[in-house]
Amino acid sequence: MDINNIVKTCRNMEHLNPEMRDKTTKFLVKHIDRSIQYTKQIRTGGCSRCKESLASCGCFCGKRHGNFLIVIYLMTKILYIGNVVLQMYMMNHFLGTDYVVYGVEVMRDMATTGEYKESRRFPRVTLCDFVVRALGRNQPHTVQCTLPVNLFNEKIFIFVWFWLAFMGIINCISLLTWFWVLFTTNRRGYIRKYLKVFDKYQKEADSTKLTAFCDKYLRQDGHFVLRMIGKNTNEVIVGELIASLWDNFGKHYSFHHRKQHV
């Protein structure tokens, strides 16, 4: 499923006339439906139902289990967090000091005194030893020197610390948010909201159908695609897609539902 092209197409839909917009929506629904049908689980053996249950809670991953895209996406976010941790460790090793708590010390100084003190990591004044040869003898001297370059180094490494800390916090929040969105029943509420807006959902008549639509048809990957479209376009477009997918699913659902009751 080419999410990048799907999102680009949805963005372009905002500038199309109603006729072209309907054709584009039908094309996207057909493409998403074909991709979802392609990844349906082929049951071969008694372990397939067990694997499907494990896949629904994120404990089992595969292209046929409807959670391949989201697991890869979450693994990428975990790698982002690992990248921040690794860079903190490398900076700590490079400077040879407790760089991990550098920003905490700066904030503590700012809170107590209103300004941060001179850091022992970047001294601005030091003692310099040098030798002067006079009258055939080497005479050692020690003088006080200033290191103006450390004024810039200190500010650069403070910025780097806060940037890495900010990226780490944002990625952790994003990771937890996506876990909540994609591995809880919250996805049913998300779909239900748009179906009610487009007058496609009746609580008593469509409750079982909604469960099948979310858990058996869309699954985690389909819901992830819709969430990604909603974050990169607007609610009208994602609502139209959900309503069209609901109608498309209804044709197959009604057929199988009648078949089970015959």
Image (cartoon, helix red, strand yellow):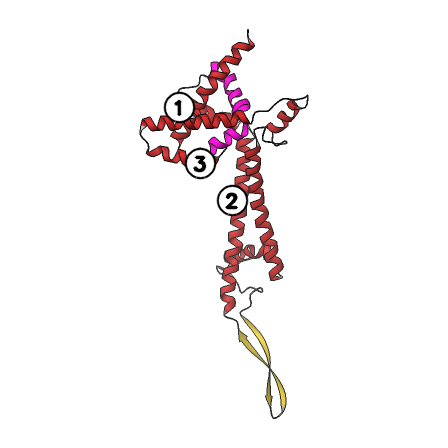
Q: Position of residue 214 (x, y in %)?
A: 52, 24
* Left or right of residue 65: residue 250: left
Give the secondary structure at mark 1: helix
Q: Are there few (<14), some (14-19), or many (20+) residues within 10 Å of tag 3?
A: few
The residue where tag 2 is placed is 170
The residue where tag 3 is placed is 5
Q: Position of residue 69 (x, y in %)?
A: 55, 34
Q: Which of marks 3 and 1 is in front?
A: 3
Task: Verify whether residue 91 appears in magenta.
Answer: no
Foreground of the two, 215 or 14: 14
The kind of residue tagged 1 is Val
The kind of residue tagged 3 is Asn
Q: Do the residues labelled 3 and 2 touch (CB within 8 Å)?
A: no
The residue where tag 1 is placed is 197
Q: Residue at x 43, y 28 (%)?
A: 28
Q: Which mark is residue 209?
A: none
Can residue 233 be seen by looking at this rendering? no
Residues in magenta, as a range = 205-233
Can residue 143 be seen by looking at this rendering? yes
Q: Which of marks 3 and 2 is in front?
A: 3
Give the secondary structure at mark 3: helix
Residue farthest along the bottom direction in this orientation: 135
Which image quarter holds the C terminus?
top right
Give the secondary structure at mark 2: helix
Q: Which one is earlier in the sequence, the residue at label 3 or at label 1?
A: 3
Task: Verify whether residue 222 appears in magenta.
Answer: yes
Q: Which residue is drawn at 42% across and 23% down?
A: 244
